[in-house]
Amino acid sequence: SYELTQPPSVSVSPGQTARITCSGDALPKKYAYWYQQKSGQAPVLVIYEDSKRPSGIPERFSGSSSGTMATLTISGAQVEDEADYYCYSTDSSGNHTGVFGGGTKLTVL
Amino acid sequence: QVQLQESGPGLVKPSQTLSLTCTVSGGSISSGSYYWSWIRQPAGKGLEWIGRIYTSGSTNYNPSLKSRVTISVDTSKNQFSLKLSSVTAADTAVYYCARVSGSYDWYFDLWGRGTLVTVSS
């Protein structure tokens, strides 16, 4: 089955740049999406189609994708950005299957 | 604006069938080319996609759950539903319903708040 791989944790100080990676064999052909989930809340879409930002999402959130790796970058991370981040994509086998990465806990302190 | 709300029993006995409903408000479930989806999250763990349905009734399921899952839609009630059979403690999770956007590449652009389902005798 298709898998997306993320690091379990990333830690930065406030104001630093946080980068969270997501690797998957189908990412050269399929878009990556990124969700932010704060404790006890539903996930919120922060990046779609590799690099687009939904309305209302701060400009410090950006995304990129190259080859089999997608990256979520938070430039000047703030304390309120501390959350779990999940990448998401779909498989390219034609089975119409959605897959989440295992999630990355971002600590900002 | 469109909102989604999950509802159903919070406690299900092992071997029984888990049943949840998602009610779509603020818009018609049939408007736009949207699929509708279920996603779950065990406590302290990651997100798992369960399946999706179009208003025509066309479905796609996670292969790991396919043998136990049925997703249906009732456009007259603006609802879609999840049934998961033969549940065990491993099915204990927060269950989210979500709206699906996109076609070749598809994703979840709107989520419900989630409902906790515990499997226990």
Image (cartoon, rainbow, N blue to C red):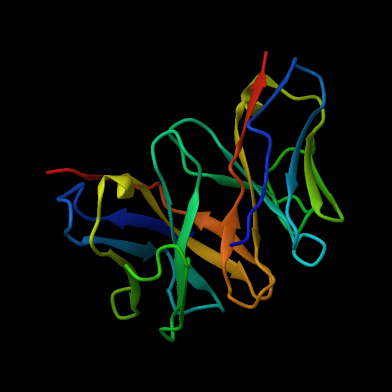
Q: Quadrant of the N terminus of chain A?
A: bottom right
- Name the foreground residue: B85 vs A76: B85
Q: Position of residue A36 (x, y in %)?
A: 60, 40
Exactly how many numbered labels are in the figure?
Answer: 0
Query: Relative to residue A97, is residue B7 depicted above or below?
Result: above
B85 sits to left or right of A107: left
Q: Residue at x 67, y 13 (%)?
A: A109
Q: Position of residue B77 (x, y in %)?
A: 28, 75
Query: Relative to residue A58, is residue B52 depicted above or below?
Result: below
A23 sits to left or right of A4: right
Q: Position of residue A72 (x, y in %)?
A: 76, 41
- The extreme left residue here reads B121
Query: Relative to residue A41, is residue B103 depicted above or below?
Result: below
A64 sits to left or right of B65: right
Q: Quadrant of residue B100?
A: bottom right
- The extreme front residue here reads A1
Q: Residue at x 73, y 45 (%)?
A: A22
Q: Quadrant of residue B106?
A: bottom right
Q: Quadrant of residue A74?
A: top right
- The extreme right residue here reads A66
Q: Residue at x 62, y 25 (%)?
A: A82
- Name the foreground residue: B71 vs A24: A24
- Name the foreground residue: A100 vs A24: A24
A99 sits to left or right of B81: right
